[in-house]
Image (cartoon, rainbow, N blue to C red):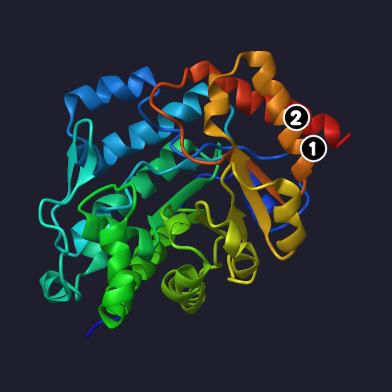
Amino acid sequence: MAAPTKVNLEFPKLKNDLIIRAARGEKTERVPVWAMRQAGRYLPEFRELRAEHNFFKIVQTPPLACEITLQPIRRFQLDAAIIFCDILVINQALGMECVMVPGKGPTFPQPIAKPEDLKRLDKDVNVRDKLSYVFSAITLTRQELKGQVPLIGFAGAPWTLMAYSIEGGGSKTYSKSKKWLYTHVEASHQFLQILTDVIVPYLVCQVEAGAQLLQVFDSHAGILGKDLFCTFSLPYLKQIVTRVKDSLRSKSIKPVPMIVFAKDAHYGLEELNNSGYDVVGLDWTIQPQQARAVTSKVSLQGNLDPCAMYCNKDDLTSKVKQMLSQFGTQKYIANLGHGMYPDFPPESLETFVNAVHEISEKMNE
């Protein structure tokens, strides 16, 4: 079998590397800032494009995904772009049908209900081929960014993807998927490993395509509690970061900084500090001082309450100042504690971004 062709893409020189330096714990002149779901429904230009195209059609069409990725970059002085995609493309690649239902969100018409259903999954999926549209979108976006800011790639974490697969969508209790962890222990680990074995090459291919940072979203980590998290989430998160970095090194590619965002996982900060990731993302319920006390090995990201975006300009600026004073300006990336909501006024993100720039610059004087 012929050796795979090494990807060697030429991209415009990066002009703003603040977030990369902050992620690596290097000194920065000010705090870099971006926002989860910064490309989304709060922007009128997104809604216009979304009205013409199915959600997953946009995800699977590189020029459309590129356009949406660039929309917030044109509006705001953000320090990073994040490729427009969805964490559930992994599940789709494994052969699961996932549709976006208006008013409900992502839905699996045929969820994984019992261990025997794992046989339906395409465990030998060719990630490079099946998810080629993501990699094409990343390469195109890197070109179109013209070096203005770095581009972030991402994936969902195994536990979060497993939970969606079993619940059939979102849930308040995640009792169906948590039931597996108690009653189908071996099958749960089997499922998590199947997902991990797709996520790893998926992230490696994103870097090869042009991603300059990677974030792993464990959006449902908080529902677990420490014991379940340390058994069914953390080992796979650690496996991902280790295998991705080792794979990149084996290809003579310098590993990019990796961020882990385990939402609501207050109990796991010490473990995440020792997990091998460069950055730990925080939700808004975690106190900055407490997080700093147990995460000396990593940079931190977060953690403004997303609903602070409903504040008037002065109050929002005040909250940003408080956040920066608590985190400090080094080894830190400003962000929300979760994603942008559809009814946020775009002007609030502008206020947030500008306040981070101005206040952190003054703090560094």
99 relative to 273 in the view: left or right: left
Q: What residue sits 30% from the left and 59% below the top?
A: 175
| Residue 2, x across and y down, in percent | 25, 82
> Where's residue 183, x and y in %?
27, 76
277, 24: nearer the viewer: 277
Do the residues bearing badges 2 and 1 touch, measured as CB atoms within 8 Å?
A: yes
Q: Residues within 10 Å of mark 1 (few under 14, many from 20)?
A: some
Instruction: Name the spot of residue 282 as percent of width and height, x first.
Output: 59, 49
Count numbered badges in the picture. 2
Residue drawn where x is 11% and y is 51% of the image: 109
Q: Is residue 43 above or below residue 172?
A: above
Image side of residue 101 versus residue 214, left or right:
left
Label 2 – label 1 distance at C-alpha: 6 Å
223 versus 77 height, above or below = below
The image quadrant that residue 56 belongs to is top left
Residue 218: image x %, image y %?
A: 44, 57
**The label number, if any, that marks residue 325 in the structure image:** 1
Q: Residue at x 42, y 32 (%)?
A: 70
* Quadrant into which the C terminus falls: top right
Looking at numbered disc 1 in the image, what kind of residue is underneath it? Ser
Nearer the observer, 299 or 256: 299
Say what amino acid the circle numbered 2 marks: Lys
Secondary structure at badge 2 equals: helix
Regarding residue 138, the answer to whether it shows in the image is yes
Residue 9 visible to an observer of this rendering: no
Which structural element holds mark 1?
helix
Q: Quadrant of the N terminus?
A: bottom left
Residue 202's label in the rendered image is none
User: Is 352 situated above or below 313?
Assistant: below
Disc sitting over residue 321 in the figure? 2
Residue furthest toward the right? 365
Looking at the image, residue 316 sits to the left or right of residue 196; the answer is right
